[in-house]
Image (cartoon, grey):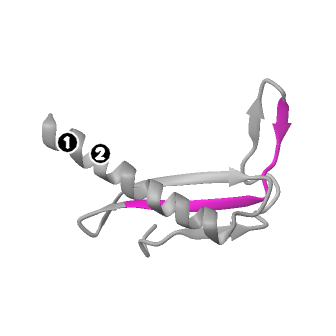
Amino acid sequence: AKAKRIVNIKHIPDGYIKIISGLGEATPTNLLICPIIHNDKTIAIMELASFIEFSKIEEEHFTNLAQVIQEKIYSLQTNS
């Protein structure tokens, strides 16, 4: 997040994070960290865990989603 770029971590260590739901629990193997940036400042971080690797296309989609989230946050702050 400090570098203001998306980070795709493959093969995260066992026990780093556990996903728990009504169906059970499991340890994901991949992590995508996507900073949400406004005016060259990181205002939030989106962290996504997965059992499969994130592709380059998925990285692009989450980068675009981060831009949309940034615009919504800015819009809410401006209108309140």
Query: Residue 13: x percent and y percent?
Result: 78, 62
Q: Count the marks: how many? A: 2
**Which residues make up the magenta segment?**
24-36
The question of residue 61 being in magenta is answered with no
Quadrant into which the C terminus falls: top left
Left or right, 43 with reference to 59? left
- The correct choice, above or below, for 33 with respect to 25 in the image is below
Which residue is depicted at the point 38% across and 49% down? 69
Query: Residue 20: x percent and y percent?
Result: 76, 34
Q: Residue furthest left?
A: 79
Which residue is depicted at the point 76% across and 63% down? 53
Which residue is depicted at the point 74% across and 40% down? 19
Q: Nearer the viewer, residue 44 or 73?
A: 73
Magenta: predominant secondary structure element? Answer: strand
> Quick one: SS at disc 2?
helix
> Quick one: SS at disc 1?
helix
Q: Nearer the viewer, residue 60 or 3?
A: 60
Which residue is depicted at the point 45% across and 60% down? 64
Determine the CA span between mark 2 and mark 1. Answer: 6 Å
- The answer to whether mark 2 and mark 1 are in CB contact below 8 A is yes
Q: What label does residue 4 carry, if any?
A: none
Neighbourhood count class around disc 1 (C-alpha, 10 Å): few under 14, some 14–19, many 20 upward: few
- The correct choice, above or below, for 6 with respect to 22 in the image is below
Q: Residue furthest bottom?
A: 3
Left or right, 8 with reference to 51? left
Residue at which label 1 appears: 77
Residue at which label 2 appears: 73
Give the residue type that dot 2 points to: Ile
Give the residue type that dot 1 points to: Gln
Q: Residue furthest top?
A: 22
